Image (spheres, rainbow, N blue to C red):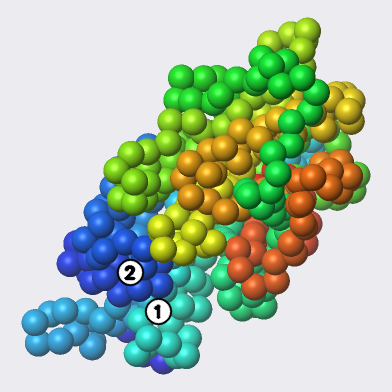
């Protein structure tokens, strides 16, 4: 392999060239100009600002063409994400994690180890940042679409990768009096989402503060903050504007037990839709539950079941509106899985993924990924 391989950030022309090459794989439901428009737009959402996203290429200056065009041997991007880490001392710290995304090698350069070299160089850089400024790059995550072994060999340990899949066209499932159920529900919009995200962060901090079952484990979690949700919504809005000339305003639903306090006993879900199949192949369109929150774990199974069904009813209504044929909820906890298994009318099935969207984590400090307990491993983290 060439000794002049270099990790660098692409020029504007190199980035457009790379986006153009990735379009058939990742933007087939768009015409190229709309795909390029989306990618440019995603560079200006809150999560991406102030160095929140960094684009990378592996190149070899010695192979530049006569017009000084460098070869793009492999490419990716890293997204900085707020996270929590609880070490052996029991202290929960707010840190930065880095999501690796959009790993792509031009077909003519594949099977030559370029992606591996690029990722090793990025990891070296992040590890150096963490050693110089602890908490600046505590760990790295990615979501593998090529199974579990390739990235595991590079240090990213695969974690639980299952989801509940609920068909949208199933019979509507309303529990109890319909008017009472509607009264207990509040839609999540841009107005109330910031407060919910702040409350979720508080609850997640409390959860990490509790001692793990294995005291030798380090606990980590990506924070489901407002910037993260807005990144997902930006993708959703752009796709819906293209296909429908309008965009969703409902981002989820909150269930409050009748007679209960407005705060402290709520259950809510935040979601976003994807239309990778467009109008022509709606079977590929999915409504993803980005985050599912139970504010008080002491809620009864009966009440939690009512909450789940009513939230799913709203999600189904929104999914139909945006031509999604299924609702997917990543890595539900054991309690939700048990309750849903008794809800035959939902026709839900648990899918264990072996090849696509495999959450994987690489620790950049002294510990290894095998010493890490990853909490709140849900769809909102995907990048």
Q: Which of 169 and 329 is in front in this view?
A: 169
Q: What residue is at 41 percent from the left and 58 percent from the top?
A: 279
Q: Would residue 92 be visible to someone looking at this image?
A: no
* Element under disc 2: helix
Which image quarter holds the N terminus?
A: bottom left
* Element under disc 1: loop
Q: Residue furthest front?
A: 171
Crowding at label 2, few (<14), some or many (≥20) Cα neighbours within 10 Å? some
**Residue at the spot of label 1:** 105
Mark number displayed over residue 286? none
**Residue at the spot of label 2:** 23
Crowding at label 1, few (<14), some or many (≥20) Cα neighbours within 10 Å? many
Q: Which of 90 and 327 is in front in this view?
A: 327
Say which quarter of the image contains residue 356.
bottom right
CA gap, disc 1 and disc 2? 13 Å
Q: What residue is at 74 percent from the left and 37 percent from the top?
A: 173
């Amino acid at each position: 392999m060439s000794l002049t391989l270099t990790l660098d950030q692409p020029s504007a022309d190199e980035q457009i060239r790379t986006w153009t090459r990735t379009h058939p794989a990742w933007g087939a439901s768009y015409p190229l100009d709309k795909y390029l428009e989306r990618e440019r737009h995603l560079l200006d959402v809150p999560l991406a600002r102030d160095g929140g996203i960094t684009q990378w290429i592996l190149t070899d200056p010695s192979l530049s063409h006569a017009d000084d065009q460098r070869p793009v041997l492999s490419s990716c991007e890293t997204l900085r994400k707020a996270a929590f880490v609880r070490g052996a001392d029991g202290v929960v710290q707010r840190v930065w994690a880095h999501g690796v995304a959009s790993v792509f090698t031009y077909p003519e350069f594949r099977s030559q180890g370029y992606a591996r070299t690029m990722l090793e160089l990025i990891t070296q850089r992040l590890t150096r940042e963490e050693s110089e400024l602890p908490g600046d790059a505590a760990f790295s995550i990615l979501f593998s679409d090529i199974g579990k072994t390739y990235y595991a060999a590079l240090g990213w340990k695969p974690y639980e990768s299952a989801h509940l899949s609920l068909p949208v066209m199933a019979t509507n499932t309303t529990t109890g009096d319909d008017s009472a159920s509607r009264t207990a529900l509040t839609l999540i919009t841009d107005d109330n989402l910031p407060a919910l995200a702040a409350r979720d962060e508080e609850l997640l901090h409390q959860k990490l503060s509790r001692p793990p079952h294995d005291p030798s484990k380090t606990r980590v979690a990506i924070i489901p903050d407002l910037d993260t949700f807005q990144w997902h919504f930006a993708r959703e809005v752009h796709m819906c504007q293209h296909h429908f000339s309008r965009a969703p305003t409902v981002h989820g639903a909150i269930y409050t037990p009748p007679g209960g306090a407005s705060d402290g006993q709520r259950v809510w879900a935040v979601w976003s839709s994807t239309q990778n199949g467009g109008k022509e192949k709606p079977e590929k369109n999915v409504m993803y539950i980005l985050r599912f929150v139970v504010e008080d774990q002491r809620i009864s199974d009966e009440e939690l079941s009512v909450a789940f069904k009513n939230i799913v009813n709203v999600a189904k209504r929104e999914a139909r509106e945006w031509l999604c044929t299924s609702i997917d909820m990543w890595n539900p906890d054991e309690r939700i899985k048990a309750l849903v298994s008794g809800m035959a009318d939902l026709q839900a099935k648990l899918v264990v993924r072996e090849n696509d969207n495999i959450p994987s984590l690489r620790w950049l400090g002294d510990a290894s990924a095998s010493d890490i307990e990853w909490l709140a491993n849900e769809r909102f983290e995907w990048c």
